[in-house]
Amino acid sequence: MKTTIDIKPYELENDDTICGYKVKDICLIAKCMDAAGVTNNDILKFVKTFENAAEMARKEYEEAFRKATIINHIEYPFGGEDDNN
């Protein structure tokens, strides 16, 4: 989805946001990236790499949580703690 906003910089308020980010900050980042020669393809690669890393971390966290839950269930099958302590 591509969205275009036709607004003049002087029309922006300090609290105008897109997805929680200040529009002025987004414009500044875009200008800096343009000046540095960052392409849309560079941004796409960065976002995909970041998404892949986040997905990998999520899977590893879920697996660790699953293992801990199974071990806890084996040690305390009825959800209680050891009554001998």
Image: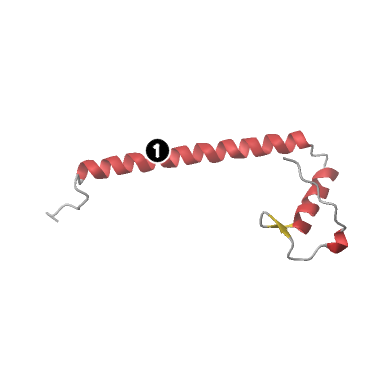
Crowd tier of the residue under label 1, counting other residues whose Cα lies within 10 Å: few below 14, some 14–19, many 20 or above: few
**Residue beneath the point at 83% across and 44% down:** 34
**Residue beneath the point at 77% across and 45% down:** 3
**Residue beneath the point at 16% across and 52% down:** 82
In-front residue for pair 1/49: 1
**Residue 52 image offset from top left, x and y in percent:** 57, 35
**Residue 85 image offset from top left, x and y in percent:** 14, 56
In this rendering, position of residue 56 left or right of residue 46:
left
**Residue 16 image offset from top left, x and y in percent:** 74, 62
The answer to which quarter of the image holds residue 49 is: top right
| Type of amino acid under label 1 | Glu
Q: Residue furthest bottom?
A: 14
In-front residue for pair 79/3: 3
**Residue beneath the point at 72% across and 38% down:** 43
In the image, residue 26 sits, relative to residue 60, either above or below, namely below
The answer to which quarter of the image holds residue 68 is: top left
Residue, disc 1: 63
- Figure colour scheme: secondary structure
In the image, residue 17 sits, relative to residue 56, either above or below, namely below
**Residue 37 image offset from top left, x and y in percent:** 83, 39
In-front residue for pair 3/9: 3
The local secondary structure at tag 1 comes to helix
In the image, residue 77 sits, relative to residue 81, either above or below, namely above
